[in-house]
Image (cartoon, rainbow, N blue to C red):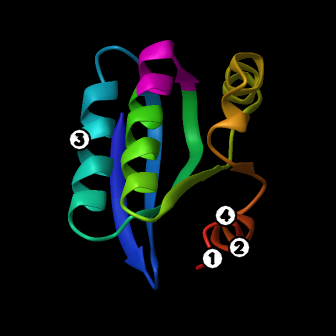
Amino acid sequence: MEITSQADGLVTIVRISGRIDFATSESLEQVVCAIIAGGRPRVILDMRGVEYISSAGLRAILIAARKAKSAGGGIAIFGLQPGVDEVFTTSGFGKVVPLVPSDAAARQILNA
C-alpha cells in the first residue's frame, strides 16, 4: 500500500493505492490520525487506486472518522473500485462515512 497526503485549502487529501488489509491498515490509521491531530480534521480519502479492503481496513477508517468528527471535521471517501465499493455497501459503511462520486462532492460534504 502507498499513501500520500496533500493539504488543499481546508481539507487534506489522502491518496491511497494498493491493498488495505491487516498488514497495512495500521499505517493508514496512523497517517490519517496524525493529520487530524495536526489540526486538519477534514480529510478526503481518494481511493481510486485501492484494489482491496478488509475488515481491518474498514476499522482503521472508522477509527479515523470518529477522531475527525470529535475534532470538528469529518472524512469523506471517493473513487471506490467496484470490488471495494461492494465491501463498503455490504457492510453499510456508507451510513458512517460519506461515499461520494468525486473530490468536489467530498469537499461539499465537508463544507470545504
Q: Earlier in the sequence, mark 4 or mark 3?
A: 3
Q: Amino acid at mark 4?
A: Ala
Task: Say few, some or many: other residues with alpha carbon within 10 Å of mark 3 (under 14 / 14 to 19 / 20 or more).
Answer: few
Residue farthest to the bottom, as pictured: 9
Give the quadrant of the N terminus: top left
Residue drawn at x 47%, y 33% as measured from the top left: 62
Disc on res. 103: none
**Which residue position is annotated with label 2?**
108
C-alpha separation, residue under disc 1 versus residue under disc 4: 9 Å
Q: Amino acid at mark 1?
A: Asn
Disc on res. 111: 1
C-alpha separation, residue under disc 4 versus residue under disc 2: 5 Å
Q: Do callouts 3 and 1 mark residues in contact (Cβ within 8 Å)?
A: no
C-alpha separation, residue under disc 3 versus residue under disc 1: 24 Å
Residue drawn at x 34%, y 69% as measured from the top left: 40
Q: Earlier in the sequence, mark 1 or mark 4?
A: 4
Q: Is residue 96 above or below residue 8?
A: above
Q: Is residue 50 above or below residue 108?
A: above
The boundaries of the magenta stretch are 52-59
Task: Say few, some or many: other residues with alpha carbon within 10 Å of mark 1 (under 14 / 14 to 19 / 20 or more).
Answer: few
Q: Is residue 98 above or below residue 35?
A: above
